[in-house]
Image (cartoon, coloured by chain):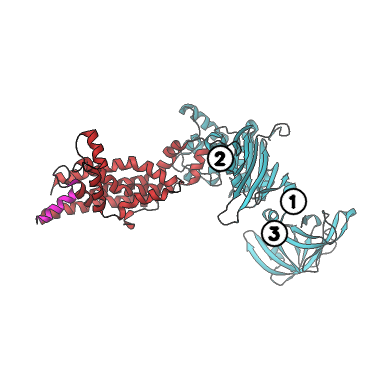
Chain colours: A cyan, B red
Amino acid sequence: MVAVGREMSPANLAACVRKLHRGDAAPSFLLDLDVEVSPGITILFGPSGAGKSTLLDCIAGLTQPDAGRIAIDGEVVFDSEKKVSVPSQRRQIAYVFQSLALFPHMTVEANVGYGLLDTPQQARGRVAEILQMFRVETLRARKPREISGGERQRVALARSLVTLPRVLLLDEPLTGLDAELKASIIDDLRTWNAAHKIPIFYVTHSREEVDALGERVIALEHGKIVSKGTPREVLDAPRRRRLAQAAGFENLLSGTVLDLREPDGVMRVHLADSTCEIEVPLGHAAPGDRVRIAIRAGDILLATEAPRALSARNVLEGRIASLERRGAVVVARVDCGAVFTVHVTPGAGRTLELAAYKRVWLVLKTHSCHFVEG
Amino acid sequence: MNIEALLLSIRLALCVSAILFVVGVPLAYWLAYSKWRWKFLLEAAVALPLVLPPTVLGFYMLLAMGPRGPLGKLWHAVFRHGLAFTFAGLVIASVLYSLPFAVQPLIASFETVDRKLLDASAVLGAGRMRTFRRVILPLSVPGIITALVLSFAHTLGEFGVVLMVGGNLAGVTRTVSIDIYDRVQSLDYPSASRTALLLLVVSFAVLSAVYGINRRAGRRQWLPWAAK
């Protein structure tokens, strides 16, 4: 749907930022990165406390970097060396906060018109147009507290975009919405941007959102960029432990490489403190290297009889250590020497008569085991 | 019952509330948002009337307003008459005396405005004045009403400062509290009692209004006699 010639156009937002990040609880760290964002959606992905929001605040001018340079469309809005710092209200940047920050005392229409300096008549026209674009025109006269969460998110987007910003910053704006609603809002955003072609910088710590939206992903951790690329590249080959956890790998196991079988594209890994050996895709490692393997709990099959004649290469025998119902999944902890977390549906749990101490077999496909650099 | 004294008190309280609104709003804005490191000194100065005996404040005000005091000299240079023992002098002294009752509820309500709303306003292109006018002020209405009502009620009930600065001139500086004191001194208890009761009823009504507004607005309450 988005036809943006992004290979051709120059970066519209260039930010080089250094700032000592002082969290309330977390230890302080140095935010130190250099990003270029071109038209279209770029995702800034990382665990909470990685410095994502601080970076957006620096770009929007709500906080000052200790050093660096920020330029939009070639115009410098911050430069520590030349002592330039354009105030927020003149940067022409739109910023949708996680809390949305709709003005509670104003109607939807007044909220959306807030940033417009046109005559009331012109403003009314533009507000009506963007409300229609984001499918909230019927809510014109309502107050933010009188509309639903998804509608508020649409109104917040409309309010930011009606001013025709040069850059759109989104700080986890769709948190708490179901996938369908999220997708429909994103579609409307993409439609809007097909006409305007501005860089959209989208912050999230949710793996699902990265999968759903991403064309380009920048992964941030402790204030530094740890990887860049397509969602697959960034998410499925986690380079660091914390990022793996953020990306939803419930199992992170230490082990030692036994041998490489290059013709098959696999290597065998012995898991620490156990007798388990598993086969994982070949990585940059040599026999004897200590490595970590990341496996999603939902990618592991669970059987109550020893499985035979399977394509999967890894079958581990163990016992259920604990079972816990969490919403629509049953979380089983299975002790095979190494302890695995496995997700099964409540139905499967009943059919298999899962119970603590029951003997089970885990089945892992080789390519569900992700090699993480030591 | 002395209607003249009551009307004078009400006139004084209205003048003081109006001036405190004009002076208090920018002062409270600055105190709520400034990051100046010595700000606490000014905060302490604003709160002084809460702890000082009114006679001490009145005494310094009297010195300042006297013919040789800086305020008195300035006033004489402009208006060709003295300031002490006049209605204007009473207004100035009362403004200082009731300052914390206006400023502190204003600060409290400005501070409860979500900072993200101010950030959102700035990002949408609004300068500080526009943000203040369109976001902070409308969201602080309960605090503003509290400030106005408390200024009014506190001025209505003041005694010590009025006695020091205003004296006891009928129709000029004899407020309702002075009048009650006078009646008691001359053993006219029935008259003192009627005026006292009226003041009690008015004060109770005003404070009930403040509590009611705060309750309806669901705001954090700030009521200064906790500090007094």
Amino acid on which the number 1 mark rests in the picture: Asp
Tag shown at residue A236: 1
Dots 3, 1 in contact, CB < 8 A: no
Q: Which is more foreground, mark 2 or mark 1?
A: 2
Tag shown at residue A61: 2
Who comes first in sequence, dot 2 or dot 3?
Answer: 2
In the image shown, does B223 or A268 lie closer to the viewer?
B223
SS class of the residue under badge 3?
loop
Location of residue A4 (image quadrant):
top right
Identify the subunit bearing mark 3.
A
Magenta stretch encompasses residue A113: no
Locate residue A217, reporting x and y percent: 69, 44
SS class of the residue under badge 2?
loop
Between the C-alphas of marks 3 and 1, the distance is: 13 Å
Q: Which residue is mark 3?
A: A250
First to last magenta residue range = B166-188
Instruction: Answer whether residue B140 is visible to the viewer in this image.
Output: no
Locate residue A368, reporting x and y percent: 77, 56
Number of residues whose C-alpha sits closer than 10 Å to that of mark 3, classed few (under 14), some (14–19) or many (20 or more): some
Q: Residue at x 72, y 60 (%)?
A: A251
In the image shown, does A331 or B20 lie closer to the viewer?
B20
Classify B154 as above or below A136: below
Identify the subunit bearing mark 2.
A
Q: Residue at x 51, y 41 (%)?
A: B120
Residue B46 is left or right of residue A327, and the answer is: left
Task: Report the residue that reaches farthest toward the right.
Answer: A263
Task: Report the residue that reaches farthest toward the bottom.
Answer: A357
SS class of the residue under badge 1?
helix
Between the C-alphas of marks 2 and 1, the distance is: 34 Å
Amino acid on which the number 3 mark rests in the picture: Glu
